[in-house]
Amino acid sequence: MRNPNRALAHSWMNRPVRVLNATYEYLGEVSADRAVVLIATGSAQSTEDVIPIFPVRSKHVEIPLPRTILLAEYVYVAHRVTVTDSSRATFAGVFDRDGRQCAYCAARATTIDHVQPRSRNGPNTWGNLVACCSSCNQRKADRTPAEAGMRLLWEPKAPRRIEKVQQKIWRELSRTCQSKGASDVR
C-alpha cells in the first residue's frame, strides 16, 4: 500500500491553503509555504490541518501542514462594487477605459459620444458611452453608428480591471511578518 505522505512531500509547497480573516470570513487562498511562514511568524494560526498529518520541519520548528489558516489580526477589505455594462459611467472613466482614443477613427478623443443617442433614450452607461474625437462626434450627430455609416473599432463594455484588494492584503501581511521578525521564530 502507498504512503499518502510520500506523494504529498513532493508537492506540499504549492498546495492551496484557505485564508480566513480574524472574523472567520473567507479572504482567499495562499500557497502552503506562505501559510507556514504566516503561522511561524505568529500572523496566523492553523484552524484545520491536512489529514493525514504532514509535518513541515525546520531546524527549530515543526508545523503540521495547514488546510485552513486564521489571521491573528483583522485585515480590512474594501467593499467591492460590481460594475456591469449597464452601470452608470463617468466621462473621466470612459476616457480612461478607452485610452483617450476615438472609438470610430482612433484619433485623440476630446469628447464623449452616446452610441444610442440621448434623444432616443440612450443612457449614460458603460455599454453606451465611448470616447470620441470632435469631428467624428459631429459627423455621427444624432444618429446611431449604423445610420451614420460609421463603425465602432471596439464594443464599449464596463472596465474589467483585476481587483488589487488581494495584493494589498498580502502586502500588509508581509509587512506584519517583517515587523515581527521572521528570524525571531525558532
Image (cartoon, helix red, strand yellow):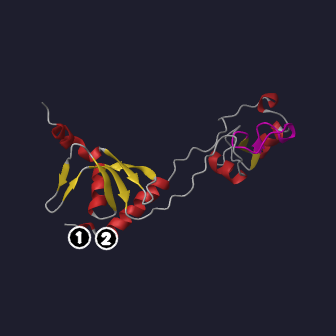
Decide if residue 154 is on the left or right side of residue 35. Answer: right
Q: Which residue is mark 1?
A: 184
Is the C-beta separation of discs 2 and 1 under 8 Å? Answer: yes
Instruction: Name the secondary structure under disc 1.
Output: helix
Q: Residue at x 33, y 65 (%)?
A: 177
Where residue 28 sits: x, y (%)? 42, 49
Q: CA distance from mark 2 to mark 1?
A: 8 Å
Query: In front: 143, or 82?
Result: 82
What number is the disc on residue 180? 2
Does the segment drawn in magenta span residue 37?
Answer: no
Q: Which residues are magenta?
A: 113-128
Where residue 79 sits: x, y (%)? 57, 55
Q: Residue at x 69, y 43 (%)?
A: 126
Where residue 154 sits: x, y (%)? 65, 35
When asked about the image quadrant of residue 14, the answer is top left
Q: Is residue 116 above or below residue 26?
A: above
Query: In front: 125, or 145?
Result: 125
Q: Residue at x 80, y 39 (%)?
A: 122
When asked about the image quadrant of residue 120, the answer is top right
